[in-house]
Image (cartoon, coloured by chain):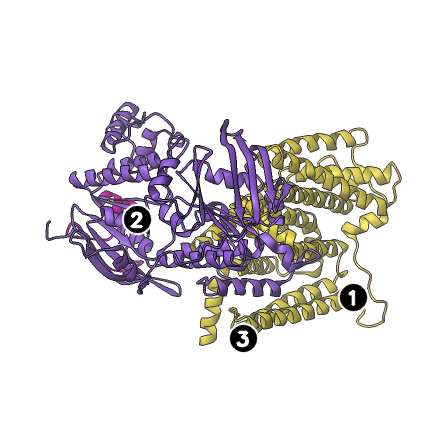
Chain colours: A yellow, B purple
Amino acid sequence: MSFINDLQKVLKQNIREYGMFIALFVIWAVFAVLTDGIFISSRNISNLLNQTGYIAVLGIGMTLIIVIRHIDLSVGFLAGFLGAVAAIAMAFWGWPVYLVIPVVLLIGLLLGFIPGFLVAQMGIPAFVATLAGFLVYRGAILVVTEETGTIIIANDVFNAIGNGFIPDIPVNFMPEVHKLTLLLGIIAIVLFVVGELNGRRTKQAYNFEVLPMNIFILKLAFTALLIGGMTWVLAGYNGLSWTVVVVLLVMGIYYFVSTKTVLGRHIYAVGGNPEAAELSGVNVKKITYVVFGQMGMLAALSGMLFASRLQSATTTAGTLFELDAIAAAFVGGVSAAGGVGKVTGALIGALVMASLTSGMNLMGIGISYQYMVRGAVLAAAVIFDVATRSRR
Amino acid sequence: MNDTPLLEMKNITKEFPGVKALDNVSFRVAAGEIHCLVGENGAGKSTLMKILSGVYPHGEYSGDILFGGELQSFGGIRDSENTGIGIIYQELALIPEMTVYENIFIGHEIKNGMMVDWNETIRQASEMLKKVKLNVNPAVKVKELGVGKQQLVEIAKALSKDVRLLILDEPTSALNEDDVANLFDLLRDLKVQGVTCVMITHKLKEIMEIADSVTVLRDGRTICTLNARNGEVSENVLIKHMVGREIDNIYPKREHKRSEEITFEVKDWCAYDPARERDILKNANFYVKKGEIVGFSGLMGSGRTELALSIFGNPERYHLQGEMFVYGEKMQFHHPEEAINAGVAYVSEDRKRNGLILIQDVKQNVTLANLREIAQRGVVDDNAEIKIANEYKDSLNIKTPTIEQKVLNLSGGNQQKVSLAKWLFVKPNILILDEPTRGIDVGAKYEIYTIMNRLVEQGMSIIMISSELPEILGMSDRVYIVSAGEITGELPIEEATQEKIMHLATKN
């Protein structure tokens, strides 16, 4: 009985943190039932993750933008534009892919500094500054694709980022299963469990509050099951896709930077109280530049992921990406008041939104109703967030 | 006096998760009196007033509220307002961009059909302003007025709702002496007109001056209610009840040691504020020696905080002229970061607005200004951070369950200690304290003073800006007086008196 009580208490206290996971789980379960299991088939999940990739990376960057109390509306078309630039560099200029990718990322970073400059230096509201960028990049895409229309990308390495899968270990064992994926999944579970155990031990050493043992074990089991389940499902198809690898990599770097580094702490300090941060020696302008700069860089990455997935650059690439990214960030628990929001949340948020699209597509629901449902879910997520916030 | 009290709160108990904020509190206010409510931070004063004003509605607490002899169960702020209870918070609830008359009638606009009747609004607003003796045009924007006048507008706003009980939460914390005198005159006037007043305050002098009775809360309990008109109240008595022990001297003693080493000096310092389009500092010259506390006294708005900010990396981007020397070396700071690196720290006046990050926890706030010290190659060492935060928690006696508690859940005095801890962790040589004890209780004040003494013992130089003359006289080794952006005088502590300081402070 006390276990149930403990569980209720822990869930109640951490509802904000676990809420998204529970929501994602419920959405998947509902779609699994409604589509007779097609939704959770290996093939669909694999597709779903690949479709989420380019929004997830934008959402991660957008989370930091919103954390420092700004917004970036320009990233959608910036992504589209930079995708086109990458395509042109490869198709018309004949640049090698290993040069194109870093150069485009660098261009993204530099272009990100422009709204950074307008916001930090000129004091222009981010909404206006980036709306201007939105229009400019919309035009820029049209300019660069004017003569050719859609630009086909013929580079296999580049296209693999959006469509390819990691290679398998060439052994004759369990031929139906992608063994490297499985192995990576097991490693991930082990690392997670070891990390959690270490964290718990440290917390106990300092007499901080930790979860009751049985709940802690339940959390470990649940997460292990989740990672394990995902891995198993993916291993049953083509294994881990390069898109997922890229997203996880970005996620890992951002998680580390935002929680463990001086830079990350400064970003959240600026979001929590810019005046206090400035007086504490944090250079608020510099942080604004950095955050807009990284957003530009992730827009470049997003644009390339999208172009790679379509194996081409189109005139409409990037349309509404920024709004999907903002939705992902808010569903992921970022607060418009600033200073609150985890980058991991944006990933879950992007998955929630992509799952809705995917599930409703499988059910044959029309696009018009899909928009309405996604709008309602976004509103519900923020209502949930606000309601659980005021309770503490 | 009438036998039925205007207000009676009986056996009020209010619990928050994990804490009993109020434990069986009783509070009686007779009609037509000025009743002061005192207690240390965290004693439960604000919680009690929030229950009375309906912020915590009926059902979220236990106990009874009787107003005018009738049992009340407020479901929200509106209910208590309609009953005749008005509350004025420390942070004023006015809209700066709106005019005085709009502010007075906001939320209960005078209507003519569906439209707001502006003429009638202005007429009634003028009447209210007359009542509070505020001689301003009701059509000016609130942001044009000083804090003292803004507060009168708040009172006018409350009066326009026919209040019978006016609650003021630390009304004088941001006022200069003139404004305070003005406010107290008004409160006495209102008393004659039949408005009863409850005033929450930390300033014992004010209680002696204005209170008819005093109720002391401590640790969520009513300690006593005293009659202030028959001599049973004195500062010592109040302090004893508030802290539960006697503090012989509010200002701990320290030897005035004279070192000759000048650690910080400013010469011909001028500042122009482009935002306000005026000079805010004119030819300031001053210095601080090692191990010295230098007091900066002056009226509100005299330019003391601006002086501190202009030294501390100039975040407001004033146009500066003049020279600054740190340990004899000429320096210029373009950002607070540079000031911090040169060993200068500034504990800001308004800890909530620009001192702390309220949504972050104690340890994050303590380490914020000096993260580099506990980081290697840009990565913060969590264990080092916890160790540092715990050290400061112990050495400054910060009362918090753990260092992972969000700062917004701490009391004012403890927040101030966190703010101080943050700046001590940058290990400064020159510490600027701007109103170091504003809005905190006697016990915490004493602790802050003790810490200051310890720091100067260790050789730190302290610049202390304060509006409270006793604090200036009790703590400083030397006093500079600022008036309208100019340093109008310098007094060694032996020669400083309240009269001399006030004389110099009002020179311009």
- Do callouts 2 and 1 point to residues on the same chain? no
Label 1 element class:
helix
Q: Which residues are magenta?
A: B61-82
- Could you tell me if the residues under marks 1 and 3 are in contact, i.e. CB atoms within 8 Å? no
> Label 2: few (<14), some or many (≥20) within 10 Å?
some
Please state if A12 lies on the left or on the right of A190 as rendered.
left
Q: Are marks 2 and 1 in contact (CB under 8 Å)?
A: no
Say which chain tag 1 marks. A
Residue B69 in percent (x, y) is at 14, 52
Quadrant for residue A104, please give it: top right
Type of amino acid under label 2: Gly
Q: Residue at x 44, y 59 (%)?
A: B450
Residue A269 picture location, percent across and down: 57, 50
In the rendering, at what x and y percent does residue A63 appear? 60, 48
Q: Secondary structure at mark 2?
A: loop
Disc 3: which chain? Answer: A
Residue marked by disc 3? A213
Q: Residue B146, position in %: x, y?
A: 38, 33
Chain for disc number 2: B
| SS of the residue under disc 3 | helix
Of the residues shown, which amino acid type is indicated by label 1?
Leu
- The reply, left or right, for residue B461 in relation to residue B159 is right
Kindly indicate whether the residue at mark 3 contacts the one at mark 2 (C-beta within 8 angstroms).
no
